Amino acid sequence: MAAAAAEWDSGSEAGPTGDRPSAAASPVKGNAALPEESDAGASASGSSEAKVDDGNIQEAESSLREGLSLNYEEARALLGRLEYQRGNVEAALRVFDGIDLQAAIQRFQPSLSEKTLSKRSNKLRSDSSNSGSQHAASLVLEAIYLKSMSLQKLGKAMEAAKQCKSVLDAVESIFQCGIPGVMVEQKLQETVSKSVELLPELWKQAGAYQEALASYRRALLSQWNLDDECCTRIQKRFAVFLLYGGVEVSPPSLGSQTEGSFVPRNNLEEAILLLMILLKKWFLRKTHWDPSVMEHLTFALSLCGQTSVLAKHLEEVLPGIYPRTERWYSLALCYFAASHNEVALNLLKKSLNKNESPNDIMALLLAAKICSSSYPLASEGVDYARRAVKDAESSDGHLKSVALHFLGSCLAKKSRVASSDHQRSLLQTEALKSLNEAISLDRCNPELIFDMGIEYAEQRNLHAALKCAKEFIDATGGSVSKGWRLLSLVLSAQQRYSEAEVVTDAALDETAKWEQGPLLRIRAKLKIAQSLPMEAVEAYRTLLALVQAQRKAYGSIKNGAEEDEDKVSEFEVWQGLANLYSSLSYWRDAEICLQKAKALKTYSATTDHAEGNLHEVRENIQDALAAYFNALSMEVEHVPSKVSIGALLAKKGPKYLPVVRCFLSDALRLEPTNRMAWFYLGKVHKHDGRLADAADCFQAASMLEDSDPVESFRSL
């Protein structure tokens, strides 16, 4: 049998190269052997160093036919095999050229079908005849297979493929109902198996990829009686060809599928199906473990975003195949890609336990990355990132840069929830220091530049943020929309609305239609900031049409990863329209939009806050307060509701001022750049007679108003 499977483009051979024929394998009548020293053998082989010519071939053939009672094709087949085994490929090819395969098939076909037609009384005679015919067929078919191998060695892949195909065509002609699982001569089965395995490789070497595809499917769908190992090699090579061949193949024919079975629609689906079949074979102990199968499956499922399916297959792999820390890390990657961050972090905690691999830098980096996206986990992320920085000190500068990047991001997140202004200031300074150090180690990392720009913008260092936004756009060639959005928001914070609008329009021209949602939202808010409400309504209508078209195209049910990527939802659009109509005193339109938003998301702090605004402008104070408190009950840290509650209670009289101060201070703790919170807190201080504190609050509100973007930088 052929050796273990190689990659599809390796061009490895799958045939016999050095074994001499044994007596048991020689298809001669009367159980006659073929000794190397016999006169017939000497006449057939000649000198091992000499090349045979036509005269020698005819003489050797005549000796074989007379001495061993072989017919013309059988004699040439045996002679050619001897030459091939001695390495005389060209001589063997000249011998094989004289074999008429079609004539041999016509002789073998009735003889091989005799057994199925014979009666029980003739069973012994039929078995003997059938065995002899199979020996003869095996010899001739092996000769054509070796002819194909000879042509491959001479670099004639196309001719070799045609010869190999003729072997399989002949087998199908002889065994019209497929090769039976029993009563088949072993040498014949080996020749068939090797030919089935070789043919797709020959077509690929010849550049005939569609023929290779057809050969793979023919190998797997026809009845060749292949053993599990041979079938496994073919399935793996086919999957590799589909994944990396660079050829878009047509789906398999529906006629070859059983009713109700899954029919793959493209290369990726067919490759995944094959790889899953291979894994199932291993689970059933029908084949040995091949780690490359899981590697190919990882690549395929990652391409189509099905990392949760990959996690399931990794969990099914029996213990002992992978080290458990490696398995935990791989599972964490899968769950992180599927947006199951909590599960991923729990797996990493197990891996980073002091009794496992506490200094695994890749696990530390992934844990820090997960924590950098969550305010509650920011402190934990700082610890992971610092451990990663320490471990990367003496190793890789790139890994140290990544660790410093995550450290800066976690420190920035931690500063947002700091309990005091002093602590917040220290954390922000440390975050900028870490990001600057990371950039010094990796100046060509666009993500680092972007995060630095976000941090500068949050601290209202708009000049530095503008510089980072431009550098990010230059580094990415303007192909990433979030760079344009950052630039537009920074310009809007500088009150340069017309320039921000020009940037947004340019970004829309450079962005694919399905990815324009966040940019259209910024355009609508820029129109509002310029007191152009009707144009803002039109921008929201365009955005709504886009979002609804996306929903119809992809369906209303999406997985978590898709929801994160699609940052503009239909709910947000109706919510924005409700706020806009409310500011224009179009109460009826505002209520309709709110109802649309509630239908999409029943329990939302944002919707309840907007409903409270409607009650407030209509001077329904109690209803407004009830709506704001409902919003807080659903989202305890909803800053707009805290500010609105503080503003309403301040109007009720001095006895509520301590409560007002509490709400406003808490809002500023969560969002230090909220100008309305500073403004109302200043009014509270003024009422209490603390004029200096009031002046500081009013000054902060004024400065923030002059640097307030149309949309929070945190939306990026």
Image (spheres, rainbow, N blue to C red):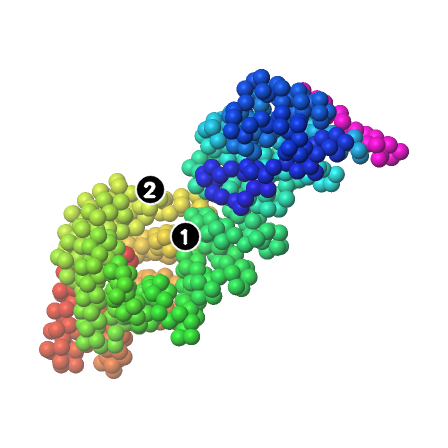
**In the rendered structure, does residue 613 fall within the stretch colored magenta?**
no
Which quadrant is home to the C terminus?
A: bottom left
CB of mark 1 within 8 Å of CB of mark 2?
no
Mark 1 to mark 2: distance in Å?
16 Å
Q: Amino acid at mark 2?
A: Lys
Task: Identify which residue is drawn at 59% across, 51% down.
Answer: 287
Q: Is residue 708 above or below residue 633?
A: above
**In the rendered structure, does residue 116 fall within the stretch colored magenta?**
yes
* Residue 96 seen by the camera: yes
Task: Identify which residue is drawn at 79% across, 30% down.
Answer: 129
Q: Residue 367, position in %: x, y?
A: 36, 66
Q: Residue 381, position in %: x, y?
A: 32, 69
Q: Is residue 120 above or below residue 100?
A: below
Q: Can you tell which quarter of the image residue 612 is in? A: bottom left
Q: Which residue is mark 2?
A: 513
Q: Which residue is mark 1?
A: 562
Q: Is residue 629 left or right of residue 249?
A: left
* Residue 176 seen by the camera: no
Q: Which residues are magenta?
A: 101-126
